[in-house]
Image (cartoon, rainbow, N blue to C red):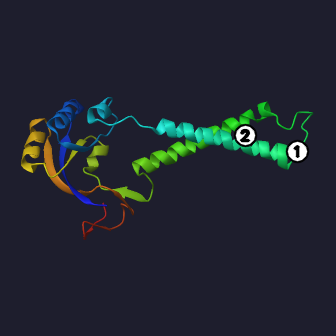
Amino acid sequence: MGVKKFIVGTFYDEQVLFPAVKKVRKAGYKLHDVYTPFPIHGLDKEMGLKDTSLHVAGFIYGITGTTTAVSFITWALTVDWQINFGGKPFFSLPAWIPITFELTVLFAAVGMVLTFCWLCQLAPFVKKDHFNPRSTDDTFVMAIECTSKTNEEEAVAFLKSIGSSEVTVENRETGWWIGRYDQDTTRFGKKVEAV
């Protein structure tokens, strides 16, 4: 996990943020992320994000659940423990539909939740560095990653010109680490007080 330099712009109005994202991408800056307190329709397209493939993962998990259910029931009722239920055949697929449906839904739901948490790096023991804690309340935050081509002074002036109310240059960890926010931690090589 590396420490990178970011230029962070703070916005207080989504009507200013939305065109600012378009201008930042058009100017050629590397947009790290935009943090908003609520979803903004169309922002993902303006940021150039690809559509998620979580639905494909859900389909694969669902098919796995269906296959597991049918395979296990077939093995249990036709090979391992053959029982005659009211004259039905041992391979009675219509009678297995409810449990097959339930396992399909269970595998798809649990698999998609775990995949979402893994992709978004969410867990009770995982914490990430925040650019601005108010981004969960009433503030919109745009982070531009500094590259070898980025001129910091020009980028700061550019963000101010497109409506950012305050702009800072910060060094932040881009990954996640195991720990808790309510305990003292060590980041950037020095002790940090609990937040």
Q: In the rendered image, which quarter is residue 161 located in? A: top left
- What kind of residue is marked 1? Gln
Q: Which residue is mark 2?
A: 70
- What kind of residue is marked 2? Val
* Residue 179 percent coordinates (x, y): 39, 63
Label 2 Cα crowd, 10 Å radius (few <14 / some 14-19 / many 20+): some
Q: Is residue 25 left or right of residue 80?
A: left
Q: Is residue 171 left or right of residue 83?
A: left
Q: Which residue is mark 1?
A: 82
Mark with earlier residue (2, 1): 2
Q: Is residue 96 left or right of residue 173?
A: right
In this view of the protein, can residue 169 be seen by the observer?
yes
In this view of the protein, can residue 103 be seen by the observer?
no
* Residue 142 percent coordinates (x, y): 22, 43
Q: Secondary structure at mark 1?
A: loop
- Label disc, if present, on residue 177 of the rendered structure: none
C-alpha separation, residue under disc 2 versus residue under disc 1? 15 Å
* Residue 66 percent coordinates (x, y): 66, 39
> What's the residue at 89%, 37% (across, down)?
85
Quarter of the N terminus within the rendering = bottom left
Q: Is residue 114 left or right of residue 149?
A: right
Residue that protrudes farthest toward the bottom in the picture: 190
Q: In the rendered image, which quarter is residue 139 located in? A: top left
> What's the residue at 42%, 51% (across, down)?
122
Quarter of the C terminus within the rendering = bottom left
Image: 3 above or below 49: below
Asked whether 157 or 57 is in front, the reply is 57
Q: Secondary structure at mark 2?
A: helix
> What's the residue at 62%, 42% (across, down)?
64
- State yes or no: discs 2 and 1 in contact (Cβ < 8 Å): no
